Image (tube, grey):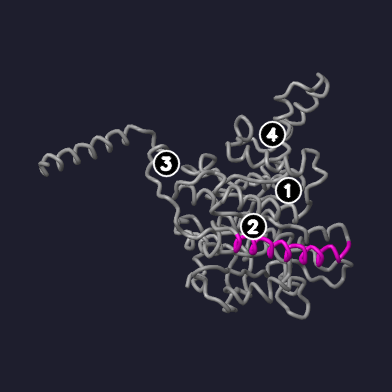
């Protein structure tokens, strides 16, 4: 073969490909230039519902023995993480609550979040900077279900924390979500597509579906269900039925969704929003401690699944961190609420555990919740240009 001709042909082909690529829209060019993902999987566990260090990190009072005695020695524990204030202006004081903490973890930025319509106790927040899901899908050739949020059934607002409103990010590089809300939407669509409903029932179900699909105005044309998600919910319905009475509830539901997702969808980044400890708002202190114990058992199940499944074994980093702390108010019947913005409601912790993370290390220097996002960016080798905090260097080896 004439090597000079071969070289000319190669150069001509490359030039032609580049010219063709230049004619594509910018977003499509970006899709074609993305790399395959080869770094570790990450499971970000929101030790949710707000928990204090006292009931988790102190051996004599812990309700999370698996986390403290078995997991912590396998990784790097940050025992003095906090949620910092933004500044001296009282109007800009951060709320130490669940949705806000979730946003801080996902974006690595402190913002004074408000509901888009100022709804009472509503948390329809819109981030001004990208989430971890957007960073990941912008950098790598991954489908939405490979950047996955597992969400509780009574926090529907948090379904839509998988994308921001920032230019060049947003819905097209969103993550996917799993929850009973998503299952109910899928089920209603299936029922309305069938022929066995009378007109009154069909009208009622259509109204119910329209109400559910209107929760977030940014979703044009309703939620999308890719083939992988259709198969997932079909499998769920085959096992648990469509009535909603046979599947687990609370955080045990989230653990079941997560394990099934690891088996069937194999997400690279998963955030699990546990929340059972927040049932203390019903007024019984044991709901708080019992919730911590349930979350502890759910974390065990996720870790054991990662050790069992080929796609996750020896290739998965767990990042376990509360959404917020809780108050320590001895003057009220339930001393550990989290709405009084007390010091202990800002005091949290973080465990990073997995391949490449030093074992048995306890870091007692003061670190910040917004550093979690940059740390995950370092583990997954993706830029997180709009985060405020630097990565937790001890966890990166």
Identify the secondary structure beneath mark 1.
loop
Camera-near label (3 vs 2) is 3
Camera-near label (2 vs 1) is 1
Q: Nearer the viewer, residue 224 or 264?
A: 264
Tell me the CA gap for discs 3 and 2: 38 Å
Question: In this figure, which residue is indicated by the disc labeled 3?
Answer: 31
Residue 205, image x and y in percent?
78, 28
Question: In this figure, which residue is indicated by the disc labeled 1?
Answer: 155
Residue 232, image x and y in percent?
64, 42
Whether residue 163 is visible to the viewer of this picture, yes or no, is no
Q: Nearer the viewer, residue 344 or 314?
A: 314
Question: In this figure, which residue is indicated by the disc labeled 4?
Answer: 213
Q: Earlier in the sequence, mark 2 or mark 1?
A: 2
Tell me the CA gap for discs 3 and 4: 28 Å
Would you say residue 296 sits in the magenta stretch?
A: yes
Q: Which residues are magenta?
A: 284-308
Label 1 Cα neighbours within 10 Å, binned few <14 / some 14-19 / many ≥20: some
Would you say residue 121 sits in the magenta stretch?
A: no
What secondary structure do most residues of the magenta stretch adopt? helix
Label 4 Cα neighbours within 10 Å, binned few <14 / some 14-19 / many ≥20: some
15 displayed left or right of 295: left
């Amino acid at each position: 073969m004439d090597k000079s001709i071969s070289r000319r042909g190669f150069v001509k082909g490359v030039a032609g490909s580049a010219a063709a690529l230049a004619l594509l829209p910018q977003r499509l060019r970006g899709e074609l230039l993305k790399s395959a993902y080869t770094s570790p999987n990450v499971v970000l566990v929101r030790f949710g519902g707000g928990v204090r260090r006292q009931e988790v990190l102190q051996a004599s009072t812990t309700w999370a023995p698996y986390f403290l005695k078995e997991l912590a020695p396998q990784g790097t524990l940050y025992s003095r993480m906090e949620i910092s204030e933004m500044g001296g202006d009282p109007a800009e004081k951060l709320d130490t609550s669940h949705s806000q903490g979730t946003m801080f973890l996902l974006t690595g930025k402190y913002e004074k979040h408000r509901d888009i319509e100022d709804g009472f106790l509503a948390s329809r927040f819109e981030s001004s900077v990208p989430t971890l899901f957007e960073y990941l899908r912008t950098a790598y050739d991954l489908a939405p279900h490979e950047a996955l949020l597992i969400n509780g059934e009574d926090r529907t607002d948090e379904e839509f924390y998988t994308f921001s409103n920032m230019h060049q990010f947003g819905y097209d590089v969103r993550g996917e979500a799993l929850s009973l809300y998503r299952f109910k939407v899928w089920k209603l669509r299936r029922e309305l597509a069938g022929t066995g409903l009378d007109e009154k029932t069909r009208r009622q179900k259509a109204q119910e579906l329209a109400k559910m699909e209107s929760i977030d105005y940014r979703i044009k044309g309703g939620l999308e269900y890719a083939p992988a998600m259709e198969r997932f919910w079909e499998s769920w319905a085959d096992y648990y039925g469509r009535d909603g009475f046979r599947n687990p509830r609370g955080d045990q539901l989230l653990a079941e969704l997560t394990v099934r997702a690891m088996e069937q969808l194999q997400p690279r980044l998963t955030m699990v929003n546990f929340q059972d400890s927040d049932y203390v708002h019903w007024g019984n202190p044991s709901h708080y401690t019992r919730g911590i114990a349930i979350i502890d058992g759910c974390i065990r199940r996720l870790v054991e699944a990662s050790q069992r499944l080929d796609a996750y074994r020896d290739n998965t980093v767990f990042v376990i961190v509360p959404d917020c702390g809780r108050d320590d108010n001895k003057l009220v019947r339930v001393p550990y609420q989290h709405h009084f913005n007390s010091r202990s409601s800002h005091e949290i912790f973080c465990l990073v555990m997995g391949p490449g993370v030093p074992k048995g290390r306890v870091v007692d220097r003061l670190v910040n919740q917004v550093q979690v996002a940059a740390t995950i960016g370092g583990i997954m080798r993706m830029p997180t240009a709009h985060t405020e905090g630097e990565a937790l260097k001890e966890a990166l080896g």
